[in-house]
Amino acid sequence: MCLGIPGKITETFEENGLKMGKVDFGGVVKTVCLDYIPDCKVGDYTVVHVGFGISKLNEEEAMETLSYLKQIGAVDDELGGEDVD
Amino acid sequence: MKYIDEYRDADLIKKQVQKIHEITTQKWAIMEVCGGQTHTIVKTGIDELLPEKITLIHGPGCPVCVTPLEMIDKALAIASRPDVIFTSFGDMLRVPGSEKDLFSVKADGGNVRIVYSPLDAVKLAQKNPDKKVVFFAVGFETTAPANAMAVWQAKKLGLKNFSILVSHVLVPPAMEAVLDSPFNIVQGFIAAGHVCAVMGYGEYEPMAEKYKVPMVVTGFEPLDLLQGIYMLIRQLEEGRYEVENQYTRAVTREGNIPAKETIFKVFDIGDRSWRGIGVVPNSGYRLKEEFAGHDAEKVFTDISSINSKESELCISGLILQGVKKPHECPAFGKECTPMTPLGATMVSSEGACAAYYNYGRYRTSTG
Ligand code: SF4
């Protein structure tokens, strides 16, 4: 139950006074409670645990982490790849 | 799939591994707290790519594994009642109680249903006013927002036939219990990203300071874990003990404020017993008094006499504390397999024993 996974919000609506939505996990679509991420909108990505969005994924931060990771690669490439001694 | 594939890039993984090798000069023992991370690490073989000097210790962070036997037996007693619809997350069904599991209660005619969200259990209570609907509220801080909301909604909707059997545990007290143990060898923590997505990581800072132990809040994909390990080893090598955040795309220092508000409207912090470990002070949630009508332990008072004893063969308590590895258990892969689990760490796919079994790690011990 702890394997929270990211999915894309494709629809939002209200039910029993709660913000709800449809979230697409690479083809599998589930109804998810979005009440804890009230500012989310269609197109955003969220980490979902047991039917609740617990965090809206931050695109800028994601880009930054990735560019950091890629940079490690780039520096190595510039230095001519792996050592062969 | 966005936010997944890019964190599994084989080339970047290789480079990040190399980086870790470059900075590691001393022996270090670090613990990944969360069972979801253990799963990724063992599945992708990250532990085998790391320098030999780094020992990864698998932590207690699998809620299925730490739910006390007594709670399972209580769940079984409630689920066997003819007036009850018992609801649970799927991964609790095969967890062995003293004599049987929820699956066998279901096979014997018990009304046991798997739900995806606790709100589905609330809906079942709305639809079945003549039945008592009970939800098995198990988990760490990651499931607490969902379970709290289910109770909050049931109260708001005036549902008298909905209750939860609470077995909620908290990660930071478990980390402190690990650090306080006389056997402890853990020098740094890969902190559980999704627990921090809910709770933030402010409360880790005094712990890092008190025990002089660095922590890195880390995500769940292979590259997240490798970057988290890199940041942690760098702190250790430099003699720092800070709380750093690798998982910035999902975690902020303050966490999810609306979720925390609902949790604390519904729950109080209290002592909890952990399977295989025992009672840890202030390590879990209990329903507040005003929600007593939704507390299964108060609705079904006859279960209070249930008092169970753990199997003597199973050493999952030592495994959860990182003192032993699964293949060091004499029953591992013999009496105990995922099809015939003796302990909860073999049942849950997030459990260390099951991860070792499923990804073939037992061969190292059995030749
Ligand atoms: S292998 Fe089985 S018996 Fe041994 S510790 Fe793991 S769950 Fe318990």
Image (tube, coloured by chain):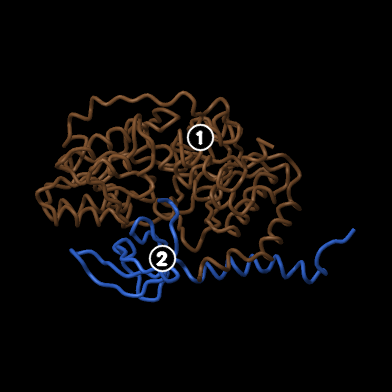
Q: Percent x, y for residue B361?
A: 62, 43
Mark 2 lies within 8 Å of ligand 1 (Cβ measured): no
Quarter residue B323 falls in: top right
Which element type, helix, strand or loop, lies under badge 1? loop
- Label 1 chain ID: B
Query: What colour is chain B?
Result: brown
Seen from the viewer's position, the closer of residues B108 and B291 is B108
Q: Residue at x 42, y 37 (%)?
A: B66
Q: Percent x, y for residue B304?
A: 23, 28
Q: Percent x, y for residue B273?
A: 37, 31
- Label 2 chain ID: A
Mark 1 lies within 8 Å of ligand 1 (Cβ measured): yes
Give the residue number, with chain letter if any, for mark 1. B336
Give the residue number, with chain letter if any, for mark 2. A46
Q: Amino acid at mark 1?
A: Cys
Query: What colour is chain A?
Result: blue
Q: Amino acid at mark 2?
A: Thr
